[in-house]
Image (cartoon, grey):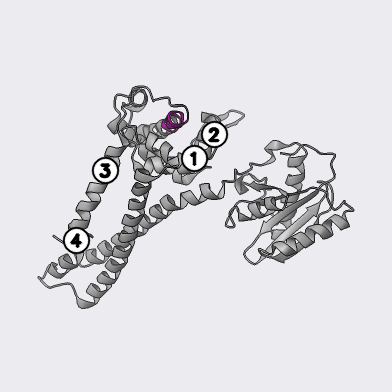
Amino acid sequence: MTTAAHTPALYVALELGQDKWHLAFATQAAEKPRSRAIRARDLGRLADEIHKAKGRFRLPADAPVRTCYEAGRDGFWVHRALAARGIDNVVVDSSSIEVDRRRKRVKSDPVDAAKLLTLLCRYHAGEAKVWRVVRVPAVADEDRRQLHRSLKDLQRQQTECSNRIQGLLASYGLTAAVNARFRDTLAELRDWAGEPVPAGLQRRLLQEFAVWEAVHAQVCQAGNEQERRLRTGSEPHLDQVRRLMGLKAVGVRTAWVLVNELFAWRGIRNGKELGALVGLTPVPYQSGQTDREQGISKAGNKHVRGLIVEAAWLWLRWQPGSDLSRWYARRFGAGGRRARKVGIVALARKLLIALWRYVDRGEVPAGAVEKDWRVRVNSKLRQRAKAAAAPAA
């Protein structure tokens, strides 16, 4: 945050839309904003409007320009383009922006831009907590996240396709495993009357299976790419992935996502910040005599939050002698199902912090068992080779 409040500067809020960008200009929070609308992604027009606004507010040509916009569909390319032109830009977490609590309130792009402009002026005047600023990753850091995110999307598509096939079969009282031998299995299926699957349904099932096969091939390709990079890559973030895989219960997917989403580029300072990044921090509600917990915030990286909860269950299974597993057993092991589910979220937060300390500082979680990461990768290679040879057999 810039604290040079006495330096005359032009403040610009950008409300980014698909077709239009709405701009709001001012030199201080109390000033009536100058509003303009330009075609989306027209950086040349944006530069012209900034130049005109400097003339309108009688600012020198070299006056600093400070801008902001909400994180969303347009990502971070706008930030990089503004920074390359010497503009001081911040990307704002939209969920942290103050809003009127009335049931009905005026909302439009010009109104939103003016609100952002006011907050931007307050932020640069010294109110650091007026909103939350998003940390912008480098292009390489952002690009590394595409592999595991695409793999997750492909696996979801594969599951959806498999569920559709199972649903169609169930409507005729049939069931079958959706795998490489599905075509042969489908030809052998018979309904309650001993009749084969009707021709129209067979065609539809085979169409769905063709989609399943295509997606499955992409899933295998993405998984093989992950393992190839782990075996042969020399980038620093891959060393962090391998280090995490040196702990029993931490597999390829868990290590890969944690490093590329958090550990490799976030610059985490402490465990409290890490928990907030993932949305695993508690949210108390206290007002007068009312005092209750609202659960975790969930205001963080959803890709990591679900994964670390899964990893916590695996940690209990494969690291039963660790201090974390013993803590969970003492605190929640004797409770009911709900208590164990609440406890696993608490364990997930502790485990995430422990894994970060293991990668960042080399502190092995107390009582944890280490292993050779190569064993995990080689075992997955053997499984994939076996699965690839199965149809030929």
Disc 4 on helix, strand or loop? loop
Where residue 188 sits: x, y (%)?
A: 12, 68
Q: Which residues are magenta?
A: 351-360
Disc 3 on helix, strand or loop? helix
Do callouts 1 and 3 mark residues in contact (Cβ within 8 Å)? no
N-terminal-most mark, 2 or 3:
2
Q: How many marks?
A: 4
N-terminal-most mark, 1 or 3:
1
Where residue 104 sits: x, y (%)?
A: 66, 54
N-terminal-most mark, 3 or 4:
4
N-terminal-most mark, 4 or 1:
4
Disc 2 on helix, strand or loop? loop
| Residue type at tag 1 | Leu
C-alpha gap between disc 4 and disc 2: 48 Å
Q: Give the residue number, with chain letter if any, for mark 1.
A: 262
Q: What is the crowding at mark 2: few (fewer than 14 residues within 10 Å), some, or many (at least 20)?
A: some
Q: Was residue 352 drawn as part of the magenta stretch in this picture? A: yes
Q: Was residue 353 drawn as part of the magenta stretch in this picture? A: yes
N-terminal-most mark, 2 or 1:
1
In front: label 2 or label 3? 3
Do callouts 2 and 1 mark residues in contact (Cβ within 8 Å)? yes
Q: Nearer the viewer, residue 350 or 191?
A: 350
Q: Give the residue number, with chain letter if any, for mark 2.
A: 268
Q: Give the residue number, with chain letter if any, for mark 3.
A: 378
Q: Give the residue number, with chain letter if any, for mark 4.
A: 176
Q: Nearer the viewer, residue 201 or 317?
A: 317
Residue 47 sits in which quadrant? Answer: bottom right
| 32, above or below 370, in the image | below
N-terminal-most mark, 4 or 2:
4
Q: What is the crowding at mark 1: few (fewer than 14 residues within 10 Å), some, or many (at least 20)?
A: some
